[in-house]
Amino acid sequence: MPVEFLGIAATHDGSETTPRTGPAFDKEYTLRLARAHEDHGWDRVLFAYGSGSPDPAPAAAYIASRLDRLQLLLAHRPNVSYPTFAAKTFATLDQISEGRLTVHFITGGNDHEQRREGDTLTKDERYARTREYIRIVKKVWTSHEPFDHEGGHYRFHDFVSDVFPVQRPRPGVSFGGSSPAAYAAGGAEADIYCLWGEPLERTAEQIETVRAAAKAAGRTDVPRIQAAFRPIIAPTEDLAWEKAHRTVGAIRDHRRAGLVRHHRGDAPENTGSQRLVAIAAEGERYDRALWTPTAAATGGAGNSNALVGTPETVARALLDYYDLGVDILSARGYALLDDAADFGRHVIPIVREEVAKRDAEGAERGPRNLERILTAVGG
């Protein structure tokens, strides 16, 4: 299966290492960054969601109206709008983009962050709501006759939309999480299941868990798997590791300067971040190129484990995950614009060429290959 690459559609130039130089929504920078991805071989970009951040839906519409090929992954939290309204918004955006939309549904892993916008449900209640929400959105996208809904979180009567997606039968649904409630919901409803970059052995375990959850939900198919990393590349291994240590130093300086908005509490609440913190505590380096101090420095905040090395080393590391069953490789550097271009120039072509060879040879993929892959990387 052809591999896909997901980048970031940031709306300003700030990152964990540098403060932004303009407004939260810098229209020209947003377009420049998206164009850098389109021009350098990326497949899609993520429009992320934060409680105080610019609304990602109009930002995605802005990019869709100006670029022709780049696909859009729109993050959405179910607590911020009613599912019938959201489904119409997504369908309209799919029309604007001429069928380039995938929606990533975020349940929310931090109570304080959720309460900033009035969401007081517990985490397990949020996952139950998300599952119901996704089912409603799918039905709105595909039903041309009015229908009623009586659920645990939503009730409405005689609804039918007058706007439908370009994609048939509907746009893709993306989902992530590492708790039992997340696996159950995503295994049942997701077309794409998103993982943060972890060591190969633990990633294989998660893939098996997702597949088991899909089977338990009665599915005959399984979600595609996405894994996310922070690549740190340079022309030589020594230069890459020097860059990696500078990056961690900049992250720590950035946080000490108070340039990062923290949630209340010292320890992360969500299982995914707890996993990253635990992995970092057990060791700094795993497998071929995985490096955990970037995650440790942020407290496991989001996609934060790095892949460090030359473009060839990082490409081989990504291929290990592809061989494990990961179809979509998410990557985001720290100098967003330059790193998007460099990764596209120097890493993506290597991975695509090698994946094409594997596909031509009919090479087996999946977690059953773990022992072979670990032997190849010296694990």
Image (tube, helix red, strand yellow):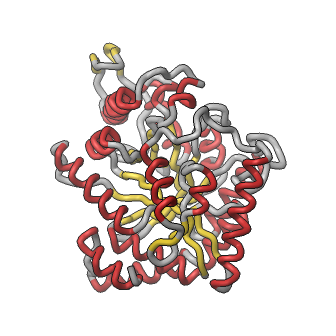
81 and 378: which one is in front? 378
Total marks drawn? 0
Instruction: Locate residue 264, reporting x and y percent.
Output: 61, 32
Q: Can you say whether 14 is above or below 345 in the image?
A: above
The quadrant the C terminus occupies is: bottom left
Q: Can you say whether 13 is above or below 55 in the image?
A: below
Q: Is residue 209 left or right of residue 174?
A: left
Q: Which residue is at the far right?
A: 21
Residue name at image x 58 percent, y 39 percent? 266
Residue name at image x 57 percent, y 48 percent? 301
86 and 114: which one is in front? 114
Instruction: Locate residue 92, reporting x and y percent.
Output: 51, 36
- Among the 4 quarters of the image, the one containing residue 175: top left
Residue 310 can be seen, yes or no: yes
Instruction: Locate residue 296, reporting x and y percent.
Output: 58, 56
Q: Is residue 164 left or right of residue 11?
A: left
Residue name at image x 46 percent, y 43 percent? 103
Residue 91 can be seen, yes or no: no
The quadrant the N terminus occupies is: bottom left
Q: Can you say whether 285 is above or below 210 in the image?
A: below
Q: Is residue 340 left or right of residue 108?
A: right
Residue name at image x 53 percent, y 40 percent? 93
Instruction: Locate residue 362, reporting x and y percent.
Output: 26, 81
314 and 329: which one is in front? 314
Q: Is residue 373 left or right of residue 166?
A: left
